Image (cartoon, helix red, strand yellow):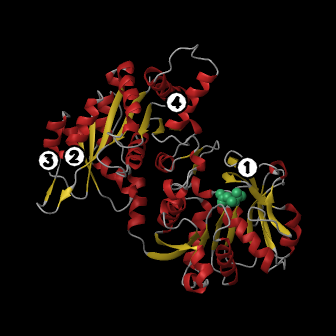
Amino acid sequence: MAKFIFVTGGVISGLGKGIAAASIGLLLKNKGLKIAVEKFDPYLNVDPGTMSPYQHGEVFVTEDGGETDLDLGHYERFIGTNITKNCSFSMGQIYSEIIKKERKGSYLGGTVQVVPHVTDIIKNKIKALAESSKADVIITEIGGTVGEIEAEVFLEAIRQFKTEMGRENVMFIHLTLVPYLKISDELKTKPTQHSVKELQKHGINPDMLLCRADRHIPEELLNKIAMFCNIDTNYVFEGIDVDTIYDLPINFHDEEMEERICERLGIKTERKDIDEWKALVDNFKNPDKEVNIGLVGKYVALQDAYLSVSESLKHAGAHHKCKVNIEWINSEDIEANGVEKYLSKLDGIIVPGGFGNRGIEGKISAAKYAREHKIPYLGLCLGMQIAVIEFARNVCGLSNANSSEFGTYEHQVIDLMEAQVGISNKGGTMRLGSYPCTLKEGTKAHRAYGEDKINERHRHRYEFNNNYRDIMNNNGMILAGTSPDNMLVEIIELSDHPWFVASQFHPEFKSRLCEPHPLFRDFVGATIVK
Ligand code: GLN
């Protein structure tokens, strides 16, 4: 039978519950256990795909086309196993499921209530994941902060879950904050005590505490927390601020956290080292060179909107022992002040994904600058469409070229696929999830992947317009990757350029520290030799 770990957070939000849960997953996987993870979010939105990147950061796309919370990205990056649509639920989705059932008459006129109906659905989702994943350990992160009204239903559900499944099969890990008070020069434990009391009020006694602090927490303070919170001393851990999130599993491992978890859940395993991970983190922290890469986007004020892109650059950097500095450039600033000011000192340029026409011309200028000045360029989804528009306008002489996403033009070099014409609803109409792509021999993409056929994740509505294949091709644009039936262009490259590659898919969702994505790896490589 599977074992279950629930991760909750207290005191304040933003303590890094997702990273902590992902690190625990990594350490348990390293011991040979099969891990599945899922996240419950307290908000009422039904479709995270339509939530603003300004508020929520990036939408992470899963293999099966799920549009999920960015924390799920950390799970994949750390644990290495693919997440599915069934690993992320908002309270909105849960309520909408119940209301649909009620409308269908499934409750036969009975009163529909938070307990047991909502809590049952939550518990069933956890059990369903255990069944479908056949994992040894299911890690469930409860979004939000204990004490918030929204979190209560989830807490009640997991309390019941433990009673049902048995104490030996369920473990609660709680993340809290131990703040430092400058005026008295001490770390304070009261917020943690209060947060644990709040959990206990819901019938949950945490088995393990992870105390976030900006400095080392002395042993006697950890003991004090253990005593006041009714937890074994060796189950109270400090979670000290780290230089990089990839340090966290190392710190946990050094404190033998995974051993305590296995002990608590009665799982027999041996101590395993994490030397491979440590070596990569060491590369990352001790680079012997450095490059500056400009990321030209729309949501640059909130860098979480491009989280997978910046993580992919870190992975590639660790591979090359190279520090990758990201310069966040708002494409509207380029429109206002010209490209030179922002791009002239860069070693590489990325235009990531995006929607809507704001700042488009600034991105087109960036692609032009990269092409003309032979600066390595990596285009991701919209970044490919931008490169195609730029090339059509300035190399093929189609001065009015554009994407039909932004209006009606004489040369709509980026356009809706036939099957999508006429659909204009928000959400749900995109090409989403993993699709195969055939690579052309002799291209940079083919060299990077070292394979003829790949699978990559998509999230977009518009495509390269096939009517323009010939003219683009004749002018030096290589169609380096297409769908296996050759109907869709998936990767373009420029022939007369050191490294200019752009993809209609989002490679950033598949990069891992131990396995940097080939396109990011070679892009960063190209910026080094430049
Ligand atoms: N807006 C473009 C489209 O829908 C690109 C989307 C993206 O970059 N993810 O096709």
Of the numbered discs 4 and 2, the one sitting upstream in the chain is 4
Percent coordinates x, y for residue 345 in the rendering: 54, 84
Residue assigned mark 3: 221
Of the numbered discs 2 and 1, the one sitting upstream in the chain is 2
- Tell me: residue 278, above or below residue 155: below
Residue assigned mark 4: 129
Find out if the beta carbon at label 3 lies less than 8 Å from the nearest ligand 1 atom. no
Q: Are marks 2 and 1 in contact (CB under 8 Å)?
A: no
Q: In front: mark 4 or mark 2?
A: 2
Question: Tag 1: residue type?
Answer: Pro
Tell me where residue 148 sits by quadrant. top left
Question: Tag 3: residue type?
Answer: Leu
Residue assigned mark 1: 436
Question: Tag 2: residue type?
Answer: Pro
Percent coordinates x, y for residue 440 in the rendering: 78, 61
SS class of the residue under badge 3? helix
Drawn side of residue 408 relative to residue 277, left or right:
right
Can residue 400 be seen here? The reply is yes
Q: Quadrant of the C terminus?
A: bottom right
Percent coordinates x, y for residue 137 in the rendering: 43, 32
Q: Quadrant of the N terminus?
A: top left
Q: Quadrant of ligand 1?
A: bottom right
Could you give the CA–CA distance between mark 2 and mark 3, rounded to whole angstroms?
A: 13 Å
Could you give the CA–CA distance between mark 1 and mark 3, rounded to whole angstroms?
A: 54 Å
Asked whether 15 or 55 is in front, the reply is: 55
Which of the labelled discs sits on residue 191, or is there none? 2
Which of the labelled discs sits on residue 480, or is there none? none
Tell me where residue 450 sits by quadrant. bottom right
SS class of the residue under badge 4? helix
